[in-house]
Image (tube, rainbow, N blue to C red):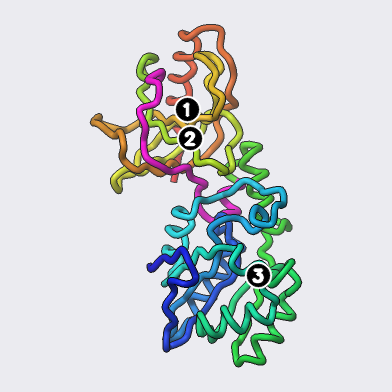
């Protein structure tokens, strides 16, 4: 999959394109309905996702919700769906465009769009003045077909990034994963940490939680962590370690239940949170903490994790 970080870098395709429009934070089940249709109905055209490097809300100076995915993670998820190209455009470059200019200059002249796909609540143009009905009208005038996807419902609730963020923050990780269509993950390069786990007899893999990402409820999770293409079962703690010297920022630390040993520092790791086990709490002593970690590992080791 080809990734662009600027609209100016994009090279128009003579074949035309099938374009999915949206910010797609988390690439959840609702987003996949849009993107999946774009990929499935592309014909001889490449499937292109036009999204943004940062939240439009941030560029507009509005309160910015935490994110469900980094751009790197988003690209990985899009590629897995079958996207051929993704453009992480600068929202500031298009936010002053009228709806008419956006369709004419971006969709027509730049992307050579033949088909456009978006969600029911998609907005575009200066101040979000364009809605899906206007998008259909303007695109039809240019010979571009538009398909608007209705919301995806799960047990009567609309799948949305805001609902998923709330579930993650409350520790309802299994529901969040169902809404996402995959397991919520924290990924990054493994750092050396402070070796507290090793001192307790449980050496851990430490992954920094990316700035701006949604932080799960503090506690212990059953997890799966992928390093160098191999997937391990893990016991992951999200929190600030109140028993052994609280931190200002939350940490993601994982004890690998089935790791044979070796140096992992600096390697890229993806830690998928599978199930919430217990909340983080302060223990009366380090021995109590160590005993609880042992129980957590036994609990997770007896769980059936996919």
* Separation (CA) of disc 2 from disc 3: 33 Å
Position of residue 248 measured from the top left corner of the image (x, y, whole percent) = 56, 24
Determine which residue is flagged by label 1: 299
Element carrying mark 3: strand
Determine which residue is flagged by label 2: 222
Crowd class of label 1 (few under 14; some 14 to 19; many from 20; radius 10 Å): few
- The mark lying in front, picked from 2 and 1, is 2
Regarding residue 150, the answer to whether it shows in the image is: no
Determine which residue is flagged by label 3: 119
- The mark lying in front, picked from 2 and 3, is 3
Question: If you read the primary sequence from the N terminus, does the residue marked by circle 2 or circle 1 appear first?
Answer: 2
Residue 265 sits inside the magenta stretch: no
Which residue does the image show at 54% across and 56% down from the upper left?
Answer: 181
Residue 183 sits inside the magenta stretch: yes
Position of residue 70 measured from the top left corner of the image (x, y, whole percent) = 50, 51
Which residue does the image show at 66% across and 37% down from the upper left?
Answer: 170
In magenta, the rendered stretch is 175-197
Q: Is residue 126 above or below residue 164?
A: below
Tag 2–tag 1 contact (CB < 8 Å): yes
Tag 2–tag 3 contact (CB < 8 Å): no
Q: Is residue 74 above or below residue 217?
A: below
């Amino acid at each position: 999959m080809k990734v662009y970080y600027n609209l100016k870098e994009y090279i128009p395709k003579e074949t035309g394109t099938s374009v999915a429009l949206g910010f797609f934070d988390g690439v959840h089940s609702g987003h996949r309905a849009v993107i999946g249709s774009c990929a499935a109905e592309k014909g001889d055209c490449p499937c292109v996702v036009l999204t943004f490097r940062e939240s439009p809300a941030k560029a507009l100076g509005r309160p910015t919700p935490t994110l469900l995915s980094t751009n790197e993670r988003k690209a990985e998820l899009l590629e897995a769906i079958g996207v051929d190209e993704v453009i992480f455009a600068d929202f500031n470059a298009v936010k002053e465009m009228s709806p008419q200019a956006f369709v004419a200059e971006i969709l027509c002249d730049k992307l050579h769009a033949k088909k456009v796909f978006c969600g029911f609540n998609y907005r575009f143009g200066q101040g979000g003045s364009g809605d899906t009905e206007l998008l259909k009208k303007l695109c039809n005038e240019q010979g571009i077909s538009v398909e608007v996807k209705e919301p995806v419902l799960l047990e009567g609730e609309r799948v949305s990034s805001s609902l998923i963020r709330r579930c993650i923050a409350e520790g309802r990780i299994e529901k969040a994963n169902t809404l996402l269509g995959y397991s919520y993950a924290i990924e990054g390069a493994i750092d050396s940490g402070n070796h507290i786990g090793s001192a307790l007899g449980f050496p851990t893999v430490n992954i920094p939680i990316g700035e701006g990402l949604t932080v799960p409820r503090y506690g212990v999770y059953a997890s799966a962590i992928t390093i160098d293409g191999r997937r391990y079962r893990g016991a992951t703690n999200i929190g600030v370690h109140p028993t052994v010297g609280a931190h200002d920022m939350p940490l993601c630390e994982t004890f690998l239940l089935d790791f044979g040993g070796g140096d992992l520092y600096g390697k890229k790791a993806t830690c998928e949170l599978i199930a919430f086990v217990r909340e983080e709490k302060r223990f009366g002593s380090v021995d109590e903490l160590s005993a609880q970690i042992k129980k957590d590992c036994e609990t997770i080791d007896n769980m059936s994790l996919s």
